[in-house]
Amino acid sequence: MTNRVVAGDLAIEMSQSGLELSSTSNPLNQLHLDRSQIFKLFEVLAGYSPKSDQNRRELFRVPLYGSAELQVNIAAHLKIIPAQPINISISGMMLELSQPDVQIETGDVIIVDLECGGFRYRGKADVSWCEGDSIGIWFHDCLNLDDPLPPVELVDIVMKLQRTWLTRRQQFAD
């Protein structure tokens, strides 16, 4: 079974053996990625941020790739908004909002509610950047990057997600 996606001049064909990337205007320009190479590509893409020069972090971010393990809701402007986690660290996270009509701006203070595998964290966060439906947030409990002292509940969630990510990474490498 294969799936094909075309975006502009790029064609991506997915199969059991991996990904085939090619040019629609010149099919001789091709690149094949096996499963381990695909995982490395995901790592690079997950770490990419168009705001990367303005948004440096010292802490490792766990890429979540649409993980259903972590449930995220934010409270902003008197509304509860479900959000899709993109990545998380002890200090903050990147989210895609499911309700783009809610106007969240850089500098807003929101309440974030995280739930993962029986662990739960609720706390304030600053919105550090906004771009389209995506936002970056810093957890108030961890704003001092010189000596972050995150709550145990947040550490439990991030560590669980790290273990899951490492397990999946190993599976792709095999």
Image (cartoon, rainbow, N blue to C red):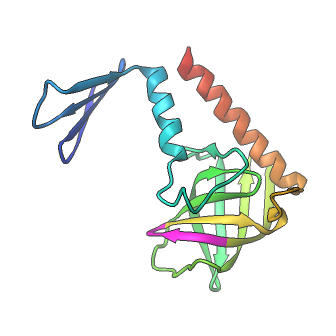
Could you say where residue 52 lies in the image, as x and y percent from the top left? 54, 56
Residue sitting at the far front: 53
The quadrant of the picture occupied by the N terminus is top left
Tell me which segment is drawn in magenta.
Answer: 127-133
In the rendered view, tell whether residue 99 sits above or below residue 96.
below
In the shown orientation, is residue 137 left or right of residue 159? Answer: left
Residue 14 picture quarter: top left
The one nearer the camera, 67 or 130, is 130
The one nearer the camera, 47 or 64, is 47
Could you say where residue 62 lies in the image, as x and y percent from the top left? 65, 43
Residue at 73% of width from left, 33% of height from top?
163
Residue 11 picture quarter: top left
In the shown orientation, is residue 127 left or right of residue 43? Answer: right
Please tell me whether residue 141 belongs to the stretch shown in magenta: no
Residue at 53% of width from left, 37% of height from top?
43
Q: Please tell me how many numbered marks the rendered image carries.
A: 0
In the shown orientation, is residue 148 left or right of residue 15? Answer: right
The quadrant of the picture occupied by the C terminus is top right
Residue at 77% of width from left, 48% of height from top?
157
Could you say where residue 169 lies in the image, as x and y percent from the top left? 60, 27
